[in-house]
Amino acid sequence: MKIVLDSCILFPTVMRAVLLGAARQGHFTPIWSRRILEEWARAARRIGPQGEIQARAEIALLQADWPDAARPTAPDLERRLWLPDPGDLHVLALAIASSADAIMTLNASDFPRNILAEEGLVRLDPDSYLMQLFARDPEGLAAVGQSVLDDANRIGGGGWQMRSLLKKARLPRLAKALST
């Protein structure tokens, strides 16, 4: 399955780490564009002066780890499309041009299911999708969760528990599943 990851999915560190951990296990192929990565960097400015600098470093690492994930934009295709937020047309056009199966986003209202269906796409939210993967591969997702937890505790000086880390990352159902 090929999935376009919206910038709101890439920006949160823990969410991104869990999803890309699942992708590394072969559960899906991630897709993004330079424009999506740029949106992530701009959004990171909101967390303070170092936010954008950190985001750009993470983006560089992401591009090195996933060189085939970045796809070209499709401005000609954008012109024939419609979404409630015209600023998201590039995401839909990228998905179509890349023959993606889905767009993963937290912005459900910006990507109506009926419009995506017309283009042969589905909208996924990360927690629900990860729960589908967990149902098929509990050991694999548990290993991803443990790796992310270990990294968070190593970087953050310890103290994180699986449930609290994943709940904070807006993955409450996965948090519960991996904590039981």
Image (cartoon, grey):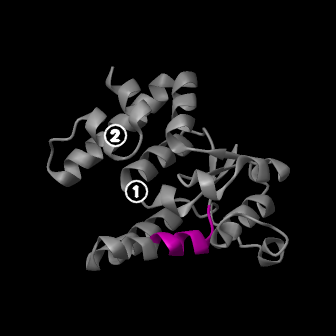
Rendered residue at 56%/59% (across/down): 66
Rendered residue at 80%/47% (across/down): 117
Q: Measured along the vertical axis of the image, is residue 156 above or below residue 147?
A: below
Tag 2: residue type?
A: Lys
Q: Is residue 35 left or right of residue 11?
A: right
For the residues marked 1 and 2, what is the alpha-carbon distance in whole angstroms?
Answer: 12 Å
Q: Position of residue 39 (x, y in %)?
A: 51, 73
What span is colored magenta in the figure? 32-40
Residue 111 is one of the magenta-drawn residues:
no
Q: Position of residue 120 (x, y in %)?
A: 82, 48
Rendered residue at 63%/43% (across/down): 28
Q: Is residue 164 left or right of residue 134?
A: left
Q: Dot 1 lies on which element?
A: loop
Q: Dot 2 lies on which element?
A: helix
User: Of tags 1 and 2, which is closer to the observer?
Assistant: 2
- Name the one closer to the observer, 64 or 134: 134
Per the image, the residue denoted by label 1 is: 12
Q: Position of residue 122 (x, y in %)?
A: 72, 45
- Name the one closer to the observer, 1 or 96: 96
Per the image, the residue denoted by label 2 is: 167
Q: Residues within 10 Å of mark 1 (few under 14, many from 20)?
A: some
Q: Is residue 141 left or right of residue 51?
A: right
Query: Which tag, 1 or 2, sits closer to the chain's start?
Result: 1
Rendered residue at 50%/48% (across/down): 20
Q: Position of residue 179 (x, y in %)?
A: 32, 25
